[in-house]
């Protein structure tokens, strides 16, 4: 029903921005077996682009759907050249991924609680989240990433609860996390954090070492082989071990610029970024000079200075010091990191409104976020490693994007499954408490 409901709202689109990269990558994979996001019909050489996971899915759809298989990147150069019917299959698949995410989350909560009502609540939190899912008909990777997030969480619970230890299950978890990283590269950093925590447990908890160490090795190898292979492929192309194209500096630039907000703009940010009425209310409460820089299209605004200014600074470095692009990127990225580290308290302070900006992707965030925090703190106090890990994935997503990027709401879609899980667990705790109080 969820798939059908979303599928019936599909509308004609004109792919832009990220969609062009995903579609072009899919075309070249299908036509030549080569990955490149170059928007051209011509034969291309292997290149580094965005995460390849969604392009692989699109390439598979091009094989099974002749209409979508007729797509050519050249038709994206002008509006109206690509017929909207070309995109029907991937749009329906995105709707299907929303349904699959709800189903997988239901299975996860049912595995954890043994009850259908909490599982249903979590699934409905995801499926009925119109604010989060409203852009599914665009050709973007987010529906795939949300489903892979729920799948990775289910695989973690599936492996954790197995007694005796199953190395095969932990390897499956590692592969699931790798698939997620191939769709959203920030989960490379989550994998590094998870590995560090697991290694710390092995070093400082001798009684758990025998169980944790083999699981850690199995999951790490399953994760590292495909992701490491992709990094090696990219290093062979440009001489630098990277997972995606050199976009991290742009993300830092668009984040660091908010460290230069005035005190009045700092307060205005919370109003302006409130979903729905926020921007209109901010224009009534604050002067135009305070509010104008928040507009993404405003010349000289925060986005323009962070996003486009990065390219200007990069070109200036290349020209002034005779650096090639890679060397200039390294130099500029170090400058941005230094600027952030020189003002750590400012960066932490501005993280709050940037964090606030992203959470509004969730239709039910006013209820979901407090429940998420309460359930996470309770799990930490109980030393419930599985629940801490599952909710920790969402907490990582919420904090990481706010620390290193402008944190537009779409970035936080992969945090919503953890919030939905917390709501299901909260209902389970309520049922358990109620049941205990009624017993004589």
Image: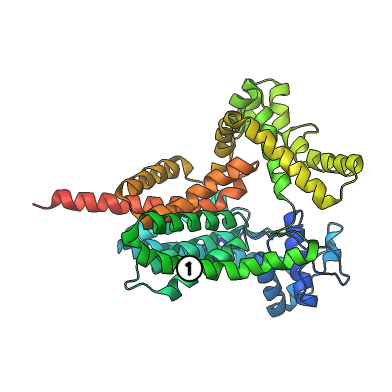
Horizontal and vertical percent position of residue 212: 39, 64
- At x 76%, y 53%, the residue is 17
Q: Is residue 30 above or below residue 411?
A: below
Q: Residue at x 82, y 63 (%)?
A: 38
> Within the image, what quadrant is residue 5 found in?
bottom right
Nearer to us in this view, 403 or 342: 342
Q: Residue 366, percent across and down?
A: 46, 40
Q: Is residue 279 above or below residue 163?
A: above
Q: Which residue is mark 1?
A: 217
User: In this rendering, would 389 be left or right of 95?
Assistant: left
Residue 159 in picture, x, y percent from top left: 40, 68
Q: For residue 343, which quarter of the picture?
A: top right
Q: Is residue 296 left or right of residue 152?
A: right
Foreground residue among 221 and 415: 221
What residue is at 65 percent from the left and 41 percent from the top? Answer: 406
* Front-lying residue, 87 or 270: 270
Q: Is residue 421 visible?
A: no
How far from the left and from the top, in percent, is residue 244? Answer: 71, 58
* Label 1, residues with CA under 10 Å away: few <14, some 14-19, many ≥20: some
Residue at horizontal 51%, vertical 49%? 396
Secondary element at image label 1: helix
Q: Nearer the viewer, residue 154 or 159?
A: 159
């Amino acid at each position: 029903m969820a798939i059908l409901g979303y599928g019936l709202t599909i509308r004609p689109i004109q792919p832009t921005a990220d969609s062009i990269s995903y579609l072009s990558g899919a075309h070249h994979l299908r036509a030549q077996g080569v990955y490149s996001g170059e928007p051209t019909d011509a034969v291309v050489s292997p290149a580094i682009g965005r995460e390849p996971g969604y392009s692989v899915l699109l390439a598979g759809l091009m094989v099974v759907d002749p209409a979508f298989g007729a797509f050519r990147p050249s038709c994206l150069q002008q509006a109206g050249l690509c017929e909207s019917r070309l995109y029907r299959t991937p749009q329906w698949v995105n709707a299907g991924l929303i349904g699959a995410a709800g189903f997988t989350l239901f299975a996860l909560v049912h595995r954890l609680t043994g009850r259908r009502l909490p599982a249903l609540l979590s699934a409905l939190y995801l499926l009925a989240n119109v604010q989060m899912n409203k852009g599914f008909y665009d050709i973007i990777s987010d529906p795939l990433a949300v489903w892979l997030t729920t799948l990775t969480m289910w695989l973690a619970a599936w492996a954790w609860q197995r007694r005796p230890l199953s190395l095969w299950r932990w390897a499956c978890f590692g592969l699931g996390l790798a698939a997620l990283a191939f769709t959203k590269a920030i989960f490379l950093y989550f994998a590094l954090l998870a590995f560090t925590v697991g290694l710390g447990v092995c070093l400082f908890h001798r009684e758990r070492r025998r169980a944790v160490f083999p699981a850690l090795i199995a999951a790490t190898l399953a994760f590292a082989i495909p992701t490491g292979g992709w990094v090696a492929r990219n290093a062979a192309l440009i001489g630098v071990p990277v997972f995606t194209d050199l976009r991290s500096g742009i993300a830092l630039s668009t984040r660091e610029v908010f460290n230069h907000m005035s005190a009045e703009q700092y307060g205005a940010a919370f109003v302006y970024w409130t979903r729905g009425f926020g921007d209109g209310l901010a224009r009534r409460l604050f002067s135009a000079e305070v509010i104008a820089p928040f507009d993404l299209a405003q010349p000289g605004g925060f986005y323009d200075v962070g996003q486009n200014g990065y390219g200007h600074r990069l070109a200036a470095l290349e020209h002034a010091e005779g650096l090639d692009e890679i060397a200039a990127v390294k130099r500029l990225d170090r400058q941005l990191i230094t600027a952030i580290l020189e003002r750590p308290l400012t960066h932490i302070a501005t993280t709050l409104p940037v964090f606030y900006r992203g959470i509004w992707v969730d239709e039910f965030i006013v209820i979901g976020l407090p429940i998420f925090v309460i359930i996470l703190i309770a799990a930490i106090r109980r030393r419930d490693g599985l629940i801490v890990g599952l909710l920790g994935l969402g907490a990582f997503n919420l904090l990481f994007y706010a620390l290193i990027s402008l944190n537009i709401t779409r970035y936080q879609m992969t945090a919503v499954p953890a919030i939905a899980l917390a709501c299901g667990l909260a209902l389970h705790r309520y049922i358990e408490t109620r049941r205990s109080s009624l017993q004589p």
